[in-house]
Image: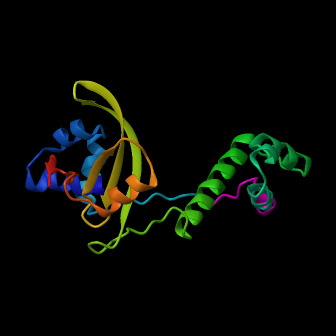
Amino acid sequence: MALLSVFRRWHFRDGLSIREISKRTGLSRNTVRRYLRGGMVEPKFQVPDRTSKLSDFADKLSLWLRTDSVKSRKYKRTAKQLHAELVTLGYQGSYGRVAAFVREWQANRLREQQMSGRGTYVTLVFQPGEAFQFDWSEDWAMIGGERVKVQAAHTKLAHSRAFIVRAYPLQTHEMLFDALTKPSACWVASPGAGYLIT
C-alpha cells in the first residue's frame, strides 16, 4: 500500500515516467501502469480457501503444545516428535507444516504473554530528595607520591541523576555514615557535565 502511494507521488507530483518508476522499483511497466490507471489504493489478492491436512489435528497439537509449555525444556517434545505422534494418529501431511504450526503457536503465545503484563515496565519518577542509590567500589589513587587503594562511596540521586563520589581508606560503618551524612566537600558529577568540587 505504501508503495502504491509512492508510485502516485513519483508519477503525478514529480512527473516521473512509468519506465523510470519501473526501473526504480524492479516491477514491470505493465504492473506500474495498472496500479496508476486502476485507481487502486491497495492490491487485493484472492487467497483460495483451502483446508490443510493439519486442520483436523490442530486442536490436538495445540493441546500438546500447551501441556508441554509448562514442562522444563528437557521434557518438551520437539516438532519432529510431535509430527511422529500425529502420524501415528493418521496425519498424512508433511513435517514442515507441523513445524510452521509450532512456530506460529509459540509466537502467538509469546505475544499474549507480553500483552498480559510480562515484558512491560513502569518508569520510576522521584521527587527531589525522595530517594538515592548507594554503592562501594575500589580504585587506586596516588596520595603523597604513593599508590594507595581507596574505597569509593557512590551516591546517586534518583531525581536529578547527579552522583556524589567520596574516597575512604576502608568500608566501615563509620565511613558509610560519613558518606551519607556529609555530601559536601566532595566530588559531584551530574549527567552531561564534568566533575565539580563543592
Q: Is residue 94 visible?
A: no
The foreground one among 145 and 109 is 145
Provide the residue span drawn in magenta. 49-60
Tell whether position 51 is magenta: yes
Q: Which quadrant would the N terminus be assigned to in this image? A: bottom left
Drawn side of residue 53 relative to residue 187, left or right: right
Q: Which quadrant would the C terminus be assigned to in this image? A: bottom left
Tell whether position 83 is magenta: no
Q: Where is residue 158, by image quadrant?
A: bottom left
Drawn side of residue 136 relative to residue 141, left or right: right
Residue ID at (11%, 45%): 16
The foreground one among 176 and 17 is 176
Q: How many marks?
A: 0
The foreground one among 64 and 180 is 180
Looking at the picture, the colour scheme in use is rainbow
Q: Picture coordinates of residue 31 (x, y %)?
A: 31, 47
Drawn side of residue 152 relative to residue 96, left or right: left
In the image, residue 116 sits, relative to residue 108, either above or below, namely below
The foreground one among 5 and 140 is 140
Q: Where is residue 42, by image quadrant?
A: bottom left
Q: Picture coordinates of residue 84 (x, y %)?
A: 85, 42
Q: Picture coordinates of residue 65 (x, y %)?
A: 75, 56
Q: Where is residue 168, by image quadrant?
A: top left
Drawn side of residue 181 relative to residue 109, left or right: left
Q: Is residue 81 visible?
A: yes
Q: Picture coordinates of residue 13 (x, y %)?
A: 9, 56
